[in-house]
Image (cartoon, rainbow, N blue to C red):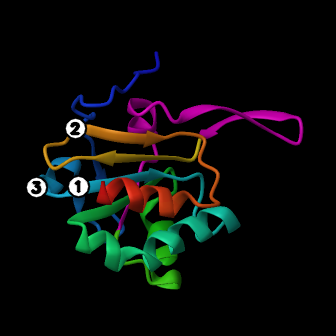
Amino acid sequence: MEHVLKIGEPVPEITLPAANGEQVSLSNFRGKKVILYFYPKDNTPTCTQQSCGFRDAYGDIEDSGAVVVGISTDDVKSHKKFIEKYELPFVLLADTEHEACDAYGVWQLKKMYGKEYMGIVRSTFLIDEEGRLLREWRKVKLKGHIEQVLESLKS
């Protein structure tokens, strides 16, 4: 059953392995806003563009008192290579069992070239300093998305 997140409510607490081998929980970031983004796959064109977009905006994001956390179902090894290749300054978490994806309702039936399969629907969540949902973007189209997130962060 898909959990529906509501603005102003606490987000699901998740703990997943990061590329550096540590177990990371969202509660580790209390006191800062968190830009949590779910993306389908490391090293694919749109996901790379999105991750590099957050990388390029990272100075502004940090200035706003926020951190970025990326999640996909890729494993830790894949994330490590992705981070090194693109010099990503933030943590990527491996959700190989898609528990976080399920908790946030982003693991859904998708269609490509007439084939149906389960996968991550590109989504971003803005979480406040106390761990409550401030804003969500589902079925993200990349054009202008990073700017929208930055706007929300500032407001």
Q: Which residue: 15% across, 48% down?
A: 27
Q: Where is residue 22 in the image (x, y as percent from the top left)?
A: 23, 64
Q: Where is residue 78 in the image (x, y as percent from the top left)?
A: 51, 67
For badge 1, the amino acid type reads Lys
Q: Position of residue 19 (x, y in %)?
A: 36, 68
Q: Position of residue 89 (x, y in %)?
A: 36, 78
User: Mark 1: few, some, or many residues within 10 Å (few <14, many ≥20)?
Assistant: many
Q: What stretch is highlighted in magenta?
A: 91-120
Cα distance, mark 1 to mark 2? 9 Å
Cα distance, mark 1 to mark 3? 7 Å
For badge 2, the amino acid type reads Arg
Magenta segment includes 78: no
Q: What residue is disc 1 on?
A: 33
Q: What element carries label 1?
A: strand
Q: What residue is disc 3 on?
A: 31
Q: Is mark 3 on a helix, strand or loop?
A: loop
Q: Residue 132 carries which label?
A: 2
User: Mark 3: few, some, or many residues within 10 Å (few <14, many ≥20)?
Assistant: few
